[in-house]
């Protein structure tokens, strides 16, 4: 989807393969949400749609606005309440619905909200479906129901139970083994949607659980994106409690990041890497990752003799390739991992079970020892705010011209590649920023590469703005 302007305010909306997001009260208002919901109701021909939301304080407003558009197009709406995004999609699959909507802005700041769309049975929208949705949204060609054919709303309160049961039913989860291990875990849900499920799952796995920021009230005590810099409190509690590890989610719990038993925040890249190493010890098959995911995955693929396919950033692109290749695992370096036997979307809740099972099978290893057995690289992740998505497009084109004499991969943004390092420059699909990721053999080289790239981009932004 291309970026568009809000009809109400003129502010940029971020519209991508993930859905639509904006700042509440500016780009994102009730009429826009209702309009998108009506477009989606038209897309699914007024059939059954599962709806859930994260804990953001703007959730009730968005909830009612979305229901208005869906009911107006004749949809049977099934409300599963406050749930992680993967929980909503799993319920859509279980109910064999014709579509689902999640009201969330995932890892975006607290003043954002949005909608993530999925088609039948929790399947992420195809490119053709996304194009159709936008055409209906922009044209206003909604298929509104007559007075006697309006839609309905029913509430189902079992979504969390079903998600936990689904995770525990995976053949790689051995509860007897995890319970015998009795790990002590600190879980930081950031007061997001993970608060209603992840502590429960950990207790089912036999863990002693210390809850941190697990009140689902939508007031985020730390940034919604669980970067290492945002996890100081979690690191301190892991150390003070003598815990075996710490977990942290983003607002809708489709991501998971780790903190070691030493209270050290780990790069989000480790979640996918550890999950892949764990799962490929049990079954062989292809993996799918994005172009900006760590080369640790190349090492894991080589060690297990499987193919690694790299796609543009975006869960939808990864899922499409997974379905095409029959891959056994996929994901992104953000801490989002896809377990196809459960569902085709990133699932931070399922990742908890995978990491706990990995540690139970690695006994008596600590998480630090497990990580130490995997060849690692230094990765630097930065982001640069841009005035608009349009300026970001111009800056990236100028950057291509700047780096034209280098080895470039243009699969997603610009990836400059050398034998022992790389840097990826790409416009975010979820925020008005340009992301710069670099990876090298040492922290110094990775940081220098990221820093010099940011300096170049800043000069290009200034050039464009003038």
Image (cartoon, grey):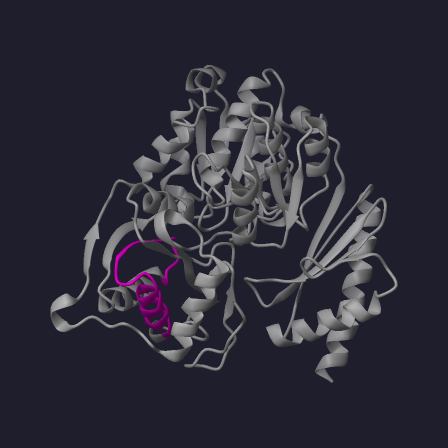
The quadrant the C terminus occupies is bottom right
In the picture provided, is 252 more to the left or to the right than 360?
left
Pick whichever, 119 or 14, lies toward us: 119
- State yes or no: residue 293 in magenta: no
In the picture provided, is 9 more to the left or to the right than 450?
left
For the point 20% across and 70% down, which residue is it? 145
Which residue of the protein is positioned furthest toward the front in this rendering? Answer: 324
Location of residue 279 with respect to 63 vertically, above or below: above
Relative image position of residue 449 (x, y in whole percent): 82, 55
Relative image position of residue 93 (x, y in whole percent): 35, 44
- For the image, the number of numbered tags is 0
Relative image position of residue 429 (x, y in whole percent): 57, 62
Location of residue 10 with respect to 197 vertically, above or below: below
Pick whichever, 438 or 283, lies toward us: 283
Which residue of the protein is positioned furthest toward the left in this rendering? Answer: 148
Relative image position of residue 399 (x, y in whole percent): 77, 68
In the picture provided, is 398 more to the left or to the right than 252?
right
Pick whichever, 127 or 237, lies toward us: 127
Range drawn in magenta: 32-58
- State yes or no: residue 43 in magenta: yes
Location of residue 438 with respect to 404 vertically, above or below: above
């Amino acid at each position: 989807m291309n970026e568009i302007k809000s009809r109400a305010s003129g502010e940029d909306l971020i519209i991508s393969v993930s859905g639509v997001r904006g700042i509440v009260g500016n780009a994102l208002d009730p009429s826009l949400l209702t309009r998108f919901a009506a477009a989606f109701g038209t897309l699914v021909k007024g059939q059954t749609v599962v709806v859930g939301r994260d804990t953001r304080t703007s959730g009730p407003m968005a909830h009612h606005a979305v229901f208005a558009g869906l009911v107006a197009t004749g949809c049977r709406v099934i409300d599963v309440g406050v749930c992680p995004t993967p929980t909503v999609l799993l319920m859509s699959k279980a109910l064999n619905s014709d579509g689902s909507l999640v009201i969330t802005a995932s890892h975006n700041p607290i003043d954002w909200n949005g909608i993530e769309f999925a088609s039948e049975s929790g399947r992420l929208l195809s490119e053709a479906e996304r194009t159709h949705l936008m055409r209906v949204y922009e044209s206003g060609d909604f298929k509104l129901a007559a007075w006697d054919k309006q839609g309905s709303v029913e509430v189902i309160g079992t979504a969390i139970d079903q998600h936990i049961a689904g995770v525990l039913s995976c053949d790689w989860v051995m509860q007897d083994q995890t319970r015998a291990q009795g790990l002590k875990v600190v879980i930081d849900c950031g007061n997001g949607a993970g608060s209603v499920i992840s502590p429960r799952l950990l207790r089912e796995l036999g863990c002693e659980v210390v809850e941190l920021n697990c009140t689902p009230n939508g007031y985020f005590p730390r940034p919604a994106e669980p970067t290492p810099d945002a996890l100081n409190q979690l690191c301190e509690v892991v150390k003070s409690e003598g815990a075996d590890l710490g977990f942290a989610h983003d607002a809708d719990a489709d991501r998971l990041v780790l903190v070691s038993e030493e209270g050290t925040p780990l790069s989000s890249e480790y979640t996918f890497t550890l999950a892949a190493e764990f799962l490929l010890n049990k079954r062989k098959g292809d993996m799918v990752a994005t172009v900006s995911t760590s080369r640790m995955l190349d090492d894991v693929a080589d060690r297990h003799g499987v193919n690694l396919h790299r796609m543009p950033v975006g869960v939808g692109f990864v899922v499409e390739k997974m379905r095409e290749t029959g891959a056994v695992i996929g994901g992104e370096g953000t801490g989002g991992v896809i377990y196809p036997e459960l569902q085709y979307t990133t699932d931070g809740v399922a990742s908890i079970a995978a990491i706990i099972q990995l540690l139970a099978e690695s006994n008596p290893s600590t998480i630090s020892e497990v990580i130490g057995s995997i060849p690692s690289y230094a990765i630097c992740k930065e982001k640069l705010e841009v005035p608009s998505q349009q300026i970001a497009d111009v800056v990236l084109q100028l950057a291509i011209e700047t780096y034209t004499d280098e080895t470039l991969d243009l699969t997603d943004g610009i990836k400059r590649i050398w034998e022992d390092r790389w840097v990826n420059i790409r416009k975010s699909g979820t925020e008005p920023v340009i992301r710069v990721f670099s990876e090298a053999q040492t922290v110094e080289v990775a940081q220098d590469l990221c820093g010099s790239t940011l300096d170049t981009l800043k000069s290009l932004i200034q050039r464009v703005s003038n």
